[in-house]
Image (cartoon, rainbow, N blue to C red):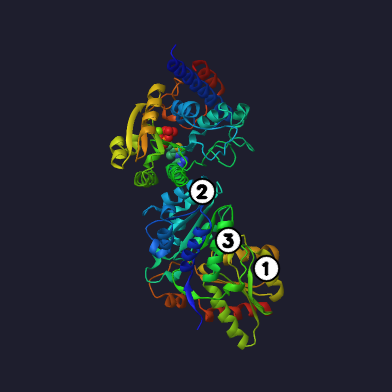
Amino acid sequence: MSKKTEKLAKLRDQARQIRRYIVSMVGEAGSGHPGGSLSATDIVTALYFDVMRIDPQNPGWPDRDRFVLSKGHAAPVLYAALAERGFFPVEKLRTLRQLGSPLQGHPDMRKVPGVEMSTGSLGQGLSAANGMALAGKLDDRDYRVFVLLGDGEIEEGQVWEAAMAAAHYKLDNVTAFLDHNGLQIDGPTDVVMSAEPLADKWRAFGWEVQEIDGHDMEQILSALARARETRGKPSIIIARTVKGKGVSFMENEVNWHGTAPKPEQVEKALAEL
Amino acid sequence: MTKKIATREAYGAALVELGQKNPAVVVLDADLSKSTKTYDFSQKFSNRFFNIGIAEQNMMGTAAGLAAAGKIAFTSTFAVFATGRVYDQIRNSIAYPRLNVKIGATHAGLTVGEDGASHQSVEDIALMRCLPNMTVLVPADSVEARAAVLAAADIDGPVYIRLGRSEVPVLHDEANFNFVPGKAITLREGKDAAIIACGIMVSAALEAAEQLANQGVSVQVLDMHTIKPLDVEAVVEAARATGAVVTAEEHSIYGGLGGAVAEALVENYPVPMRRVGVRDTFGESGKPQELLEKYGLTASDLVRVVYEVLKRKGK
Ligand SMILES: Cc1ncc(C[n+]2csc(CCOP(=O)(O)OP(=O)(O)O)c2C)c(N)n1
Ligand SMILES: [Mg+2]
């Protein structure tokens, strides 16, 4: 195996492991959001296990790269990645959503090392990412800021205020991912409120746009590499994804947005993963 | 004649002062820098000033991100847009994560004047006061406004600073002024009743106390510049010493200073009390002074209400 093939295989395996944690922890919690966590898993894995400059021993390191989970309901994927990366023990994952646990239903930056922004109210993460990016430029630090948006989330007006501002301030240290799984809560995004044409909109707002398969590790890495080279404007990677990816009975099923699997469903899912 | 200066003027000057002292201070505005007075800062420290355009939600969120990366971020717009328009952004991106964002809200209250009710925020204190982690400051004059801005920068966490458009008398002596957030300032001692006031109503309270003194009524005046955390000790002490309390604010009688003082007294030391403020109504266009008269926010209104509360105390 070439080095590259080896790396890709390792990342895919890591993503599989994270999906297992997502299913188990949401199952154990008895509530939570598996669909949008599973659709974002490959993206989050690529960031935390290959791309981002981070040090789990030093979560406050000023030069670290930042990741803002704007679609905060996908907390399980972030928690699993942080735990696997060593920010806190993986055993903690079992406490998701329980009284007294740092693992709140939506991420709390004051409770969990590695969480860069408290999110949960949709539409706010890109603004925060912009602020971090502006601070980086001001301080002459070369850290990068990554942000993950949902394709339903971008119906929020604040997202477009922030999109405008990121281009205006030439925030080439910002890279956004759009988790384009085509579903929100009340149904398909095209039916509830279409934001199409997506790529044209972001381009018109002054962004460098790439469109990829959000489950193809190689495409994710090469898109991130290209985003890194982009100068003078922010980048967005529109990642075509499948909500519930990896668990056959959850895939493309709108009802698995915010429903926890029952114990036998957890078992069935783990057998597939 | 006492000198008159708008608190927003002092805000702008204090930001420049802070900018010189502390490189971590950044300022954001939403296309109102000439009105909010952040303009001077924008000229002196252009790299640390961010005009976010007419996009207040994004301004609050961007400030949160700047604060998360170590900056002390001052955001500025009119009070009405700095609170209600962005309530969820303040709640979820600033107050809940306890980020170091300061909200310099100018043009608060009826004294915005001619722009009318759409621009006259009379509910902002209530909105900010019920947010956990939020400190709420309402300076009475330019001296106090400067001190409040400097103090806000030293507080590790979100602070709401309520500022006015119109010029107000300078009450405090810059040279010997000691501002401690959460500690009320006694401006006048008295034994018959206490007026607890904030913002522009502090000068009205002093005027009322003077008139009442001429009529043989001795009134204590407290400048309650911090609505949260409220100086409960000072409130209770005033109630104990005088047995009758009147609050005065350029804000709704619901949820602001009057609400806070009423809560403190009911739980600790109930005495007859009256609230002077905007009585559950929106404002309207007019000259600031005309509006204060129409909505019952003048020194003579305070005199009348002090007599009312004294009557109840006598019973
Ligand atoms: C401001 C706000 N409005 C509504 C919600 C409730 N909500 C949570 S997730 C969601 C749908 C999100 O859809 P999308 O962004 O496509 O997320 P994904 O499909 O990736 O899970 C909604 C409406 C919220 N969290 N925040
Ligand atoms: Mg979606």
- Nearer mark to the viewer, of 2 and 1: 2
User: Which numbered disc flags the more N-terminal residue, 2 or 1?
Assistant: 2
Q: Amino acid at mark 1?
A: Ala
Q: Amino acid at mark 3?
A: Ala
State whether label 1 is within 8 Å of ligand 1. no
**Displayed-image quarter of ligand 1:** top left
**As drawn, is A109 to the left or to the right of B235?**
left
Pick whichever, A5 or B294, lies toward us. A5
Pick whichever, B79 or A155, lies toward us. B79
Whether residue B246 is visible, yes or no, is no
Using a 10 Å C-alpha cutoff, classify the residue at mark 1 as few (fewer than 14 neighbours), some (14 to 19) or many (20 or more). some
Q: Could you say which disc has been placed on residue B234 in the image?
A: 1
Question: Mark 2 — residue?
Answer: B67
Question: Mark 3 — residue?
Answer: B151
Q: CA distance from mark 2 to mark 1?
A: 33 Å
Residue at horizontal 45%, vertical 25%?
A: A42
Residue A75 horizontal/vertical position (percent): 51, 34
Numbered disc 1: secondary structure:
helix
Whether residue B100 is visible, yes or no, is yes
Residue B190 horizontal/vertical position (percent): 67, 79
Residue at horizontal 37%, vertical 41%?
A: A155
Pick whichever, B281 or A269, lies toward us. A269
**As drawn, is B160 to the left or to the right of A232?**
right
Pick whichever, B53 or B194, lies toward us. B53
Q: Amino acid at mark 2?
A: Ala
User: Which numbered disc flags the more N-terminal residue, 3 or 2?
Assistant: 2
**C-beta proximity under 8 Å, tags 2 and 1:** no
State whether label 3 is within 8 Å of ligand 1. no
Quadrant of the frame with the N terminus of chain A: top left
Using a 10 Å C-alpha cutoff, classify the residue at mark 2 as few (fewer than 14 neighbours), some (14 to 19) or many (20 or more). many
Q: Chain of mark 1?
A: B
